[in-house]
Amino acid sequence: MNKKIRTEATDNLFQAVLKLQNIEECYAFFEDVCTVNELLSLAQRYEVAGMLNAGKTYVEIAEKTGASTATISRVNRSLNYGSDGYGMIFSRLEAERTE
């Protein structure tokens, strides 16, 4: 975990996110917390991560998502050298699909 982002304020934000109970609550909360562009950027990065995880090429990802190669590269670096946040979520989602 990156100790630079671990603050009381981020802890409070994450505690608030954990209280969300469904997708409609997520939309309401994130629309208030983020600008439209910030939210779309987060969604795009998550989509890029999923496609990289599925073995798609940079060209395929760029064409489908509109993400720049710099964004794709940054997400790929997070997948390979980050805190394994994406991997944790992808594993949980896969486990739910196979139940």
Image (cartoon, rainbow, N blue to C red):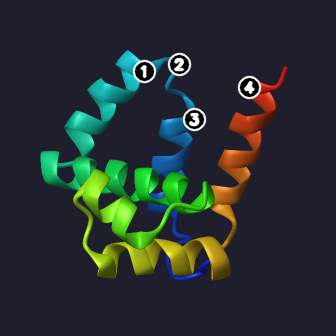
Q: Which residue is mark 3?
A: 18
Question: Which one is nearer the viewer's eye here, 1 or 46?
Answer: 46
Identify residue type, mark 1: Ile
Across and down, in percent, residue 28 comes to: 28, 25
Question: Which one is nearer the viewer's eye here, 34 or 69?
Answer: 69
Q: Earlier in the sequence, mark 3 or mark 4?
A: 3
Q: Which residue sits at x=61%, y=54%?
A: 54
Q: Secondary structure at mark 1?
A: helix
**Vertical placement of residue 66 versus 23, above or below:** below
Label 1 CA crowd tier, 10 Å (few <14, some 14–19, many 20+): few
Identify residue type, mark 4: Arg
Q: Secondary structure at mark 2?
A: loop
Q: Earlier in the sequence, mark 2 or mark 4?
A: 2
Identify residue type, mark 3: Leu
Q: Answer yes or no: do the residues labelled 3 and 4 have beta carbons within 8 Å? A: no
Q: Which mark is residue 78?
A: none
Q: Which circle, 2 or 1, is nearer the viewer?
A: 1
Residue 79 image-quadrant placement: bottom right
Q: Which residue is mark 4?
A: 97
